Image (tube, coloured by chain):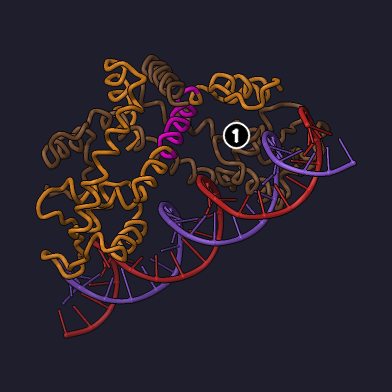
Chain colours: A brown, B orange, C red, D purple
Amino acid sequence: MTSDDRRMVSPRQIADAWERELPGVPTSSIRVLTPLRRVAKRLTDDRRRTLDRLGVDPATLDLLSTLRRAGEPWRLTTRELAAQTLVTAGAISQRVARAERDGLVARTTSDASRRAVAVTLTDAGHRLVERVVGELLTHEETLVAGLEAADRNALADLLDRLDESLG
Amino acid sequence: MTSDDRRMVSPRQIADAWERELPGVPTSSIRVLTPLRRVAKRLTDDRRRTLDRLGVDPATLDLLSTLRRAGEPWRLTTRELAAQTLVTAGAISQRVARAERDGLVARTTSDASRRAVAVTLTDAGHRLVERVVGELLTHEETLVAGLEAADRNALADLLDRLDESLG
DNA sequence: TCGGCTATGTTTAGACCTAAACCTACCGGA
DNA sequence: TCCGGTAGGTTTAGGTCTAAACATAGCCGA
């Protein structure tokens, strides 16, 4: 144990520790996956706190953003919403229910079929998303500013490729 | 709307959509942060399901792993645990309570001071973590296998640097 | 020795998510 | 026309997390 209990353990130290403690376990994934999870956790926490200051929660903003980005008439079915957000249909249903309760979206039956449910932004939903998105994106610019543009591009490419290989 | 509602929208498409819908909002962070969050979500979901098959949950395994990796005598204070896992003290407290209830760890007062709480692996905890870690790491090797070794190294370096710039 | 400050943990309230069960609408063949 | 199968959504049970309020223990200056 070092004297500073608070020092973050590096991915390399984690891999080395496993090789010392359980020789033979494959550790090569650790050096990628550990910093990936760690960065994602920091970003998720930061996003939650930033949005809390702005008066929304991340789940609701994701919903409103997806609708807003879709353009006129700002209407998508729950299935389309689920496809874009990588959460289960049940989670979408709950998100829509919360946002509807708060007057940010409205549920209407889709034109296409009677069982499909379409979700539309209300005026309040429009106002909220338009007030928040610019601030959020402006803030997030600062989060990646620690990397040079070339590094950001390289990182984005590698992540895209990993994403594709996973999905 | 395209005919295939299920197609995943690319980060580039998301950035383009914002520029079309709300011209002027800064979008350069999207190309990095969106695939990062997406990959992290896929990996988290995969880990949860894999561990579910192996009979543990991710939170408990993180706790047991941290203790096991620490080496003899497999004992850390809750503060040391919190420092390594990027989770709040309250979450650590709940994790330890659950693992203690399941007989995987034991709480003892630390030697150093009476208010510090030390957590130790029980025999059952040892058996569980040793049974699971090898399988989990072996499985996770396959998740990053879609990238060449050089790309994995480059990705790990970039993530390390981003992590450092965030923390 | 007293009072306050800091460090450590625990508890509680509230939010969110997944998995799985469930409910309807629709479709297509016999 | 029936009936099974499939697709689209919702509900429920259970689990985890954060933030914030609490509780204690130890420390330190006046």
Residue A42 in view in this figure: no
Indicate whether B113 appears above or below A157: below
Q: Nearer the viewer, residue B125 or A51?
A: B125
Residue drawn at x 40%, y 35% as measured from the top left: B43
Q: In the picture shown, does residue B99 fall above or below B148?
A: below
Q: Is residue C1 above or below residue B57?
A: below
For the point 57% across and 34% down, the residue is A85
Whole-percent x, y for residue A76 in the image: 72, 33
**Kind of element beneath mark 1:** helix
Q: Nearer the viewer, residue B164 or B74?
A: B74
**Residue pointed to by mark 1:** A133
* Number of residues whose C-alpha sits closer than 10 Å to that of mark 1, classed few (under 14), some (14–19) or many (20 or more): many
Residue A164 picture location, percent across and down: 46, 21
Q: Position of residue A18 (x, y in %)?
A: 17, 39
Within the magenta stretch, is there residue B38?
Answer: yes
Query: Could you tell whether B139 is left or right of B19 in the image?
Result: left
Q: Give the camera-side residue of A94 and D24.
A: A94
Q: Main secondary structure of the magenta part?
A: helix
Identify residue type, mark 1.
Answer: Val
Chain of the residue under label 1 = A
Q: How many marks?
A: 1
The answer to whether residue B10 is magenta is no
Q: Is residue B78 visible?
A: yes
Q: Which residues are magenta?
A: B31-45
Q: Residue at x 10, y 55 (%)?
A: B73
Tell me if B42 is positioned left or right of B63 in this view.
right
Determine which quarter of the picture holds residue A145: top left
Q: Quadrant of residue B164?
A: top left
Q: Position of residue A37 (x, y in %)?
A: 36, 36
